[in-house]
Image (cartoon, rainbow, N blue to C red):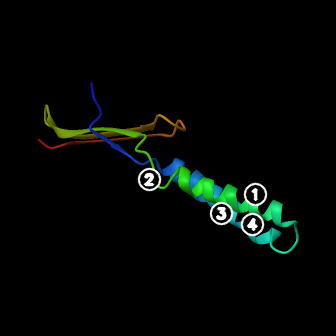
């Protein structure tokens, strides 16, 4: 069975945002306090981290369905990331007859 959709994982996005923030903070904290070579290395680390995820990969597989079955309205959703292992599942059912 194939996925209904592929999208960007929220956990991977948060990891990326945190990584960039740490690299920026390290760069800012070192300004004027370390040799130029070290500062340039930190700048290169930041630029590399930004380039790695310029276009975030769609690693979150989404599967879902909804409909009325045997007098019950049902919704089910599951999402799982092939990169970080994030998982989310939601199910709802209500009698309609």
Q: Could you classify mark 1 by the number of other residues whose Cα lies within 10 Å: few (under 14), some (14-19), or many (20 or more)?
A: few
**Count of labels in the image:** 4
Classify 55 as above or below 43: above
Q: Secondary structure at mark 4?
A: helix
Classify 59 as above or below 42: above
Question: Are the residues tagged 3 and 4 within 8 Å (C-beta)?
Answer: no
Q: Does residue 62 appear left or right of residue 70 in this picture? A: right
Residue 23 in percent (x, y) is at 69, 60
Lower sequence index among marks 2 and 4:
4
Lower sequence index among marks 2 and 1:
1
The residue located at (21%, 41%) in the rendering is: 66
Mark 1 = which residue?
41
Mark 4 = which residue?
27
Q: Could you classify mark 3 by the number of other residues whose Cα lies within 10 Å: few (under 14), some (14-19), or many (20 or more)?
A: few
Residue 1 in percent (x, y) is at 27, 24
Query: In the image, which is nearer the foreground, mark 3 or mark 4?
Result: 4
Q: CA distance from mark 3 to mark 2?
A: 17 Å
Residue farthest top in this picture = 1
Lower sequence index among marks 3 and 4:
3
Question: Are the residues tagged 2 and 1 within 8 Å (C-beta)?
Answer: no
Q: CA distance from mark 2 to mark 4?
A: 23 Å
Q: Does residue 42 appear left or right of residue 48 in this picture? A: right
Mark 2 = which residue?
55
Question: Are the residues tagged 4 and 1 within 8 Å (C-beta)?
Answer: no
Q: For residue 21, which numbered disc appears in the image? A: 3
């Amino acid at each position: 069975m194939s996925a209904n959709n592929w999208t960007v994982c929220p956990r991977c996005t948060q990891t990326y945002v945190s990584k960039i923030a740490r690299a920026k903070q390290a760069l800012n904290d070192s300004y004027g306090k370390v040799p130029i070579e070290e500062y340039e290395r930190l700048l290169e680390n930041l630029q590399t981290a930004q380039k790695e995820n310029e276009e975030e990969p769609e690693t979150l597989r989404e599967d879902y369905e909804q409909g009325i079955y045997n007098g019950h309205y049902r919704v089910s959703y599951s999402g799982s990331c092939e990169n970080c292992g994030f998982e989310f599942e939601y199910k709802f059912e209500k009698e309609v007859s």
